[in-house]
């Protein structure tokens, strides 16, 4: 019952920017967009979150469209260590429940 | 200086046995979680505890019983193990957003449970 749609897989060349799209057309006004990733055999790792403004941290940038129905996670200079499954999750800010979908398997190509 | 730790990392056991998985966090967080990731890689929340009180229970069979002796620990006990319980179990923790935190969850390394 994930509220997001992501492509199942993507490839990106090492050193290039990886742009991962996410559709969340039913997002409500108080719901945030969160991104997590899961590197093989490890626990998920928080990347970034946002409400309506674009956000940037040391790991990535998050671009949210003006209507908030979609967003893009950008890894500016992808490395081999960025190969992982990336999950886009929509939830209320104070809601502890993370609902993971199937995510996007991102493969960084040397 | 591990933030969220789980023991054991691997657990292989027979059907019908009872087993426990332990989780500890040293981040001072108020909320802890258990997630299950099945063979198809679907990751689903099972339980959440806030300050030792159960706040999320996602229709998990009664054979699964979480126990939180203090807010730094959340253990998962499973009775009468079944083949379908084979999965990777992840523990996580987060700080309450009421304290000004972002609420991001920090996950442990996982416990791979195999029921034979």
Image (cartoon, coloured by chain):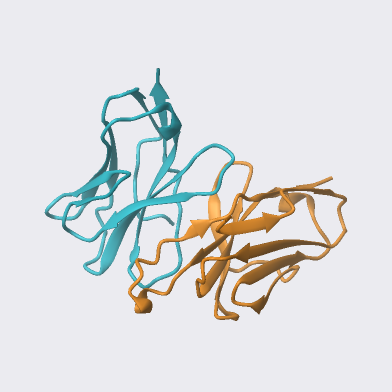
Chain colours: A cyan, B orange
Count every numbered label the image shows and give the total: 0
Position in image of residue A21 (x %, y %): 28, 40
Front residue of B82 and A37: A37
Position in image of residue A98 (x %, y %): 45, 61
Position in image of residue B115 (x %, y %): 80, 48
Left or right: where A81 falls relative to A73: right
Front residue of B74 and B27: B27
Above or below A26: residue B74: below
Q: Residue at x 49, y 49 (%)?
A: A44
Q: Residue furthest front?
A: B1
Above or below A7: residue B61: below
Front residue of A48 and B1: B1
Position in image of residue A24 (x %, y %): 28, 52
Q: Residue at x 73, y 53 (%)?
A: B85
Give the position of the N terminus of chain B as an image quadrant.
bottom right
Front residue of A13 and A6: A13
Left or right: where A56 falls relative to B91: left
Quadrant for residue B36, please give it: bottom right
Q: Residue furthest left?
A: A66
Q: Residue furthest top?
A: A110
């Amino acid at each position: 019952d994930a509220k997001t749609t992501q492509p199942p897989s993507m490839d990106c060349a090492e050193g290039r920017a990886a742009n991962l799209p996410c559709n969340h057309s039913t997002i409500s006004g108080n719901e945030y967009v969160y991104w997590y990733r899961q590197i093989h055999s490890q626990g998920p790792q928080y990347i970034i979150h946002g409400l309506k403004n674009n956000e940037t941290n040391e790991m990535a940038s998050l671009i949210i469209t003006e209507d908030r129905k979609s967003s893009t996670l950008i890894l500016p200079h992808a490395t081999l260590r960025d190969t992982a499954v990336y999950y886009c999750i929509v939830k209320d800010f104070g809601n502890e429940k993370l609902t993971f979908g199937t995510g996007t398997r991102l493969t960084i190509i040397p | 200086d591990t933030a969220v730790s789980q023991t054991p990392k691997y657990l292989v056991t027979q059907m019908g046995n009872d087993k426990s998985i332990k989780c500890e966090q040293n981040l001072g967080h108020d909320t802890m979680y258990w997630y299950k990731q099945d063979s198809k890689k679907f990751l689903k929340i099972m339980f959440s505890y806030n300050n030792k009180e159960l706040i999320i229970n996602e229709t998990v069979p009664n054979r699964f019983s979480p126990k939180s002796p203090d807010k730094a620990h959340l253990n998962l006990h499973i009775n009468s193990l079944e083949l379908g319980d084979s999965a990777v179990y992840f523990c996580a923790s987060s700080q309450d957003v009421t304290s000004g935190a972002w609420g991001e969850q920090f996950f442990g390394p996982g416990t791979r449970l195999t029921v034979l």
